Amino acid sequence: MEWFTDDGYYWARLVFQRGLAALYCVAFLAAANQFRVLIGERGITPVPRFTAQVPFKAAPSLFQLRYSDRLFAAVAWTGAALAAAVVLGAADAVPLWAAMVIWLVLWALYMSIVNVGQTWYGFGWESLLLETGFLAVFLGNDETAPPILILFLLRWLLFRVEFGAGLIKMRGDRCWRDLTCLYYHHETQPMPGPLSWFFHHLPKPLHKVETAANHVAQLGLPVLLFLPQPVATAAALAIAVTQLWLVISGNFSWLNWITILLALSAVQLPLPDRDLPDAPLWFTTLVCAATALVLVLSYRPARNLLSRQQKMNASFNSLHLVNTYGAFGSITRVRQEIVIEGTDEPVLTPSTRWQEYEFKGKPGDPHRLPRQYAPYHLRLDWLMWFAAMSPSYAVRWFPSLIAKLLDNDRHLTKLLRHNPFATGPPPTYIRARLYHYTYSDWQELRATGNWWHRELVGEYLPPVRQSDLVSG
């Protein structure tokens, strides 16, 4: 069936599938390492409480049938091991039907996690991984050439990711239209990377060039993906380069990496010296059925792209099969950070010594250069960025976070970079203060070693004891 497959995308499929499996592995590892304190049986927002209120139809998941921390850990570690096996070539070493089962299991396991993850999993790249993972089920393995229909759907997905992000910017914050958003973005983005300080201090004319190039990459290049080769390949490679620019300038979990993989799936290269057999009829039938399903489900996301009330990062079905994407429709001009402090003194006085907790990713100590964590996702650090913008973002989970700090919860403190009470008794009081953070300039960096300059804005949470939270 020459019309159905294209040998020229053999290498594209190979890189795409191995890369996607690596991202699945990272996602499962992040879930395994963080779930107990975030959504575990005794977590900040426990899964059993969620499943008792939300029906299976609204959030299909294995954990709707039964939940335990042991079962969750088994699911997460099984997913990580299976994904690692695919990275090493397991899906190409088994029959075609078995490879499809492997990809389907990865998708089902991760969907089970996302659908009970609540606000901790409310990010666009969760749905993006699931939608991409669903399409990977039908991409085949070494037993057949890549099916053209699925390659087209991968481009359609990439188009929605990029074009949707471009439209939300042009419809949103004025600074995208006057090319000034990057005056602020590198400093105020959710989790800066080690090079973000340097990007922020680029000359303002270069920031305008960055912004204009972003518009070209997100509103122009995606259209070219549907033109004949080699135009589509050139557009895809250009998109990949722009995504690498974002990778080195910030920490956006696996958003940029999965976009790069989607772009590489459109790159056509000469076939290796081998013959790939024709696709069997049963596989062709399944691919056609999956394509029809995706096209039907694409109606609402496509309509959303054309809407003046465009939504960002929304799923229109509980299986996350075809979604809408977008990022940074508005840009924060001022960076505020919550600094949590504790003391072990039994009575508070004006001279009480408060000690700071340090998070792994989010800014805290002004002397500390931000680290590179992406594609790994530090969920608590990201939610702290939202909480700093407004307490309303954190009203459902922040009190429980404080209660666990007062208990010196070992699962929580593992998610922190520094716990000042690691070797002694737990704190008697916890407080949270809001600071205004700005990058230091070259002169201040040389004189003090500070990457950040911070000024106290005010109190975010007054000093509380465990009894205050219980009584409240």
Image (cartoon, rainbow, N blue to C red):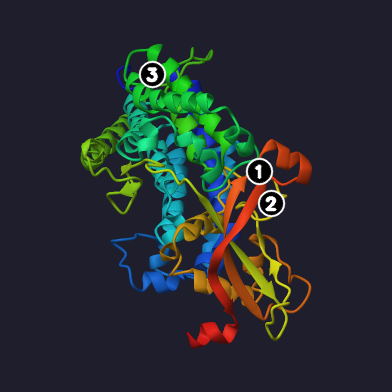
In this orientation, does residue 60 appear?
A: yes
- Disc 1/disc 3 C-alpha distance (Å): 53 Å
Depth check, front residue: 337 or 416: 337
Classify 50 as above or below 183: below
Mark 1: which amino acid?
Ser
* Quadrant of the rendered image containing residue 360: bottom right
- Disc 1/disc 2 C-alpha distance (Å): 9 Å
Q: Which residue is mark 2?
A: 366
Asked which secondary structure carries label 1, the reply is loop
Classify 374 as above or below 345: above
* Quadrant of the rendered image containing residue 348: bottom right
Q: Which residue is mark 1?
A: 440
Residue under the image location 61 percent in, 56 percent down: 455
Q: Which residue is mark 3?
A: 6
Mark 2: which amino acid?
Pro
Q: Is residue 282 left or right of residue 184?
A: left
Q: Position of residue 255 (x, y in %)?
A: 48, 40
Whether tag 1 and tag 2 are in contact, CB under 8 A, the answer is: yes
Whether tag 3 and tag 2 are in contact, CB under 8 A, the answer is: no
